[in-house]
Structures are given as structure tokens and as C-alpha cells.
């Protein structure tokens, strides 16, 4: 058995031409292997039983020799892939699960039955160039460039990626080489393997943006440090998923989800400050702030898109007001183009941030500045900390949302950030508590957050109307006032419901 420790990168044709020189400059010694044409087939059952277990089964043929490979469930952190792998020679083109050691399989897996039902799901065909490099520290790193395509269900997806696998030595050398590659521009860390991309293509299930941040998967026996690691890992993957979603289908709401992931990373650094101090995260926090500033325009762009969508009631009103329609058209033309947005995701600064987050997590760099108090706090049970934190948040919410006070648009807008912070704490730690009572408790607060977003949209449109001295906007302003009053009434009902609930963490 081997355990892969590798980084994956999606690269452009421009980067391919720079790769040999980059490797030569970095390495103490380079062994350049002949290019090979690799023909691969991936197998599963009709009900995707292997996929459900996060197991990949592949056959590979090259120069009239074939092998079969099993990759068991592992983990992916910011582009760093780690998972157990088993390889065996193969006499035919059909794999045989029962040829692998019996003890590798998950408990209860019906190996014989699955083996009987296997059939090829998709294939990959690519040319692989390989370099084995030795560093000054004595580490050995295999660098491969794969260029070809994935074929599934009559569809084709291009493969153009670089992988770096640590064969021997220090993991820091892999990250150092990765930093050099990132500086080439037009590079992105890859979250999804060829197998994952092939399954999405074969099953016609393209990557889709999430509607919201879900709960970080935690176990009740975790300590604070383990919970922090889980939160940061989840948030990094959330960011990378929606970055990839944007490349496949460029939508503003996808960018909003990416921003949500960045916000979750920042929140986790704050939430677990008893374990992770500011000294160890100063650079990360500065770079996360830069990403937030780079995409600060997205919320306004979503509002403008709402105004101009023919499916929305706003469109009918605005289209009858030429002055306002012309202003909104001008605002649309000033927003960044898709190419400029993608350039940020392919920039050295952005990818260095993702790589720095990855190294911070896998190397537990927060331990380098630990005090005795932080080390002790790291071992405390997170479930006990969560209950105390939620109780404190609940008292703050009751203070800023008093029952007898009627809230205006500006009141709600002023409290949006605080409410979002509390909901993010719930996303980080809510998995430790009963699902039913937790979801019932949080549901009306999500209604209020959605209401605040709609209030913000109405308020922005009102501001645009007030910037113009035009009689044809008066009826729109009257309509906006009615919409706002109705929305506030609904939000007040949701807020009153929250006051009657029993907190789920008690």
C-alpha cells in the first residue's frame, strides 16, 4: 500500500511551456522520463456502490501492460490530496476486487457482489510527462503533467493539470515547489480528481453551487483544536468548490457562496481564538480581507441583476421608468467582466493564500505560538465550549432584538452583521446538537436574514430613485414603500416566533 501525498493544479497551455525550466531551476537533480500515453477506465456498479464509499477503482494500460488500482477514502485539504492506494498487475481489461488484500475494505462491504456487478463508467486518455526531482534537502518529488481528456456518456472534458507527489522527504519541499508554480500565473489548485470529474460527467450531475453554508461535520468527543481543524478544512473546501463552480457556470450567486466560505474561514479564526492567536494568523487575515475587498461589489451586482430579471416584479416597474432603467444599465456596464474575475482566481496572490491556508492547517502552524493556556484550551471538549458560546450569543441577540421594540429597515440592516456572525457560529458548532430542535430554532432566523437581504435591495433601489429628480419615479417610490412595509411586517412575525423558542443547546 502507498499513501499519496500530492498537490493538484489546473494549468493553462502557457504554463506547460514554462514547467521544464521551473523544475530545473528548483531542483538539485532532475530525472526526465519519456512521455507515456495512459489509457484508463473507471469501474463501478449501476448503483454507484464504490462511489458511495469514496472508493475509486481504475484500470490503466500503457505499452501493452495493464494494472488495476484501488484508491480508498482519504482527505483533500486545499489541493493537498492524501489517500491510501493499492496497485496490482492485471491480466485482462476487467478489474478483480477480490485480488486485493481482504483487510483493506470498509466494514460490511459486499466485495463479491460488487465485483460481479462492475462495469466501465468512464475513461480518461492522456499523455503524461514525468520528472523525478531531488531537492537540496534530499527530498524526492515526482512532478507529472497530464494533458488529454475525460470521456463519459458521449461527453468530453479537457485534462490539463500538474500533480506533485512527495516520494520521500519533507512535505515543505512540495509546498515550496508549488509556490514556484503558482507564480507562473494561470494556475489554480485543484479540488477534484479526474475520477470525481468523470463521475460528474458520466452521471450528468454537473457541479452546483450550494444554497447556503451547511454544518461542519463534528463529533461530540472532539476537543477545540480538532473542531477548529474541521471548521477550517470545511471552509477551504467550500471556497474551492464555488471557485470551480464559477469557472463552469459564471454566476454572481456562485461568487456570493465563495465569499461566504471566505467569511467562514475568518469566523473560524475568530471563534477559536482561545486556541489560535492573532500572531499566527496575521498574514492570513490580511489576505482574506483582500479577497473580501476584491469581491465587495458582488452584493450590489446581485441586487442589480434582481432589478433587471424579467422573472422579477422589479423589472416591470423599472422598465416603465426610462430614467431609472438607464441608470441601472450604466451600473451593470461598470461591473468586472468574467475574464477579470477568473484572473483573480488564477493569480499568484489568491493561490498563495489557498496554499498558505493549506499549510497552516496540515502543519498545525498555530502550535508554533502556543502558550500554556492555549495548549490547555485546545484539549477542552468542544461540546462544552459550544453550549457556553451559544448562550452568550443568545443573550446578545435578545439585547439587540428586544421584543417590545418595533424594528425599521435601518434597524434590521444595522444588525445584519451581528446576526450573520451568530449563524456562522451555529454552522461551525451546530452539528454537536439535536438536528430537529437545532433546525427549528434556526429556521426563523434564516427567514429574517433573507428578509434583511430583500430590505437591502429595496433600500438600494430607493436610493437610486432619490438620486434622480424625475416624476416618473414617484410611483416606484410609493410602491417600494408598500413592499418595505409588508416585508417588515412579515419579518416582525418571524422575530416574535424566535422569542418563544427554547434554545437547542440547553
Image (cartoon, rainbow, N blue to C red):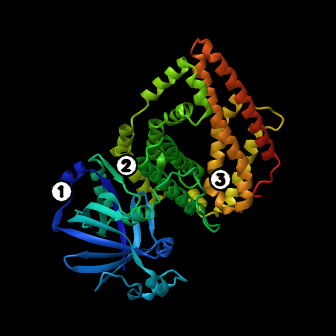
Quadrant the C terminus occupies: bottom right
Q: Is residue 37 left or right of residue 362?
A: left
Give the distance between the C-alpha atoms of the residues marked 2 and 3, in whole angstroms.
Answer: 29 Å
The numbered dot on residue 426 is 3
Circle 3 residues within 10 Å: few <14, some 14–19, many ≥20: many
Q: Earlier in the sequence, mark 1 or mark 2?
A: 1
Asked if the residue under mark 2 is in contact with the one under mark 1, i.e. CB atoms within 8 Å, the reply is: no
In depth, the one of 365 and 185 nearer the eye is 185
**Which residue: 66% across, 41% down?**
449
> Relative to residue 468, is residue 118 depicted above or below?
below
Give the distance between the C-alpha atoms of the residues marked 1 and 2, in whole angstroms.
Answer: 21 Å
Which residue is denoted by mark 2 in the rendering?
Answer: 351
In depth, the one of 15 and 236 nearer the eye is 15
Residue 139 at x, y = what percent? 26, 67
Q: Earlier in the sequence, mark 2 or mark 3?
A: 2
Residue 276 at x, y = what percent? 53, 53
Q: Secondary structure at mark 2?
A: helix
Q: Secondary structure at mark 1?
A: helix
Q: Earlier in the sequence, mark 1 or mark 3?
A: 1
Amino acid at each position: 500500500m502507498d499513501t499519496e501525498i500530492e498537490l493538484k493544479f489546473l494549468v493553462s497551455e502557457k504554463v506547460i511551456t514554462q514547467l521544464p525550466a521551473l523544475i530545473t531551476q528548483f531542483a538539485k537533480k532532475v530525472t526526465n522520463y519519456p512521455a507515456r500515453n495512459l489509457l484508463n477506465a473507471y469501474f463501478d456498479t449501476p448503483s454507484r456502490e464504490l462511489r458511495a464509499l469514496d472508493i475509486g477503482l481504475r484500470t490503466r494500460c500503457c505499452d501493452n501492460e495493464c494494472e488495476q488500482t484501488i484508491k480508498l477514502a482519504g482527505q483533500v485539504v486545499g489541493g493537498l490530496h492524501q489517500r491510501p492506494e493499492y496497485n496490482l498487475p492485471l491480466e485482462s481489461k476487467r478489474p478483480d476486487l477480490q485480488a486485493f488484500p481482504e483487510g483493506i475494505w470498509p466494514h460490511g462491504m459486499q466485495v463479491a457482489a460488487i465485483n460481479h456487478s462492475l462495469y466501465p463508467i468512464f475513461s480518461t486518455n492522456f499523455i503524461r510527462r514525468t520528472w523525478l526531482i531531488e531537492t537540496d534537502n534530499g527530498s524526492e518529488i515526482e512532478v507529472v503533467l497530464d494533458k488529454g481528456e475525460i470521456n463519459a456518456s458521449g461527453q468530453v472534458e479537457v485534462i490539463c493539470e500538474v500533480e506533485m507527489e512527495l516520494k520521500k522527504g519533507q512535505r515543505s519541499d512540495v509546498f515550496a515547489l508549488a509556490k514556484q508554480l503558482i507564480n507562473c500565473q494561470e494556475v489554480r489548485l485543484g479540488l477534484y480528481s479526474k475520477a470525481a470529474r468523470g463521475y460528474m460527467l458520466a452521471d450528468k450531475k454537473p457541479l452546483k453551487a450550494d444554497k447556503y453554508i451547511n454544518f461542519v461535520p463534528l463529533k461530540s468527543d472532539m476537543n477545540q483544536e480538532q473542531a477548529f481543524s474541521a471548521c477550517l478544512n470545511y471552509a477551504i473546501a467550500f471556497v474551492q468548490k464555488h471557485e470551480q463552480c464559477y469557472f463552469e457556470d459564471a454566476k454572481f450567486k456562485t461568487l456570493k457562496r465563495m465569499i461566504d466560505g471566505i467569511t467562514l474561514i475568518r469566523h473560524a479564526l475568530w471563534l477559536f481564538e482561545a486556541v489560535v492567536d492573532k500572531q499566527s494568523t496575521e498574514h492570513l487575515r490580511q489576505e482574506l480581507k483582500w479577497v473580501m475587498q476584491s469581491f465587495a461589489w458582488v452584493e450590489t451586482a446581485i441586487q442589480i441583476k434582481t432589478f433587471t430579471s424579467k422573472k422579477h416584479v422589479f423589472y416591470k416597474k423599472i422598465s416603465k421608468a426610462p430614467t431609472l432603467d438607464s441608470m441601472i444599465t450604466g451600473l451593470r456596464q461598470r461591473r468586472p467582466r468574467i475574464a477579470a474575475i477568473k484572473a483573480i482566481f488564477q493569480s499568484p496572490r489568491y493561490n498563495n493564500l489557498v496554499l498558505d491556508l493549506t499549510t497552516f492547517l496540515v502543519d498545525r502552524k498555530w502550535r508554533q505560538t502556543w502558550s500554556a493556556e492555549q495548549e490547555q484550551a485546545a484539549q477542552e471538549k468542544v461540546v462544552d465550549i459550544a453550549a457556553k458560546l451559544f448562550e452568550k450569543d443568545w443573550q446578545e441577540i435578545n439585547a439587540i432584538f428586544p421584543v417590545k421594540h418595533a424594528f425599521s429597515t435601518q434597524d434590521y440592516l444595522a444588525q445584519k452583521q451581528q446576526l450573520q456572525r451568530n449563524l456562522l457560529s451555529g454552522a461551525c458548532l451546530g452539528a454537536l446538537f439535536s438536528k430537529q430542535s437545532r433546525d427549528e430554532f434556526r429556521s426563523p432566523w434564516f427567514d429574517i436574514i433573507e428578509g434583511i437581504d430583500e430590505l437591502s435591495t429595496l433600500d438600494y433601489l430607493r436610493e437610486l430613485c432619490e438620486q434622480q429628480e424625475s416624476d416618473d419615479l414617484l410611483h416606484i417610490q410609493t410602491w417600494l414603500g408598500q413592499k418595505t412595509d409588508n416585508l417588515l411586517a412579515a419579518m416582525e412575525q418571524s422575530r416574535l416566533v424566535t422569542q418563544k423558542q427554547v434554545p437547542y443547546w440547553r
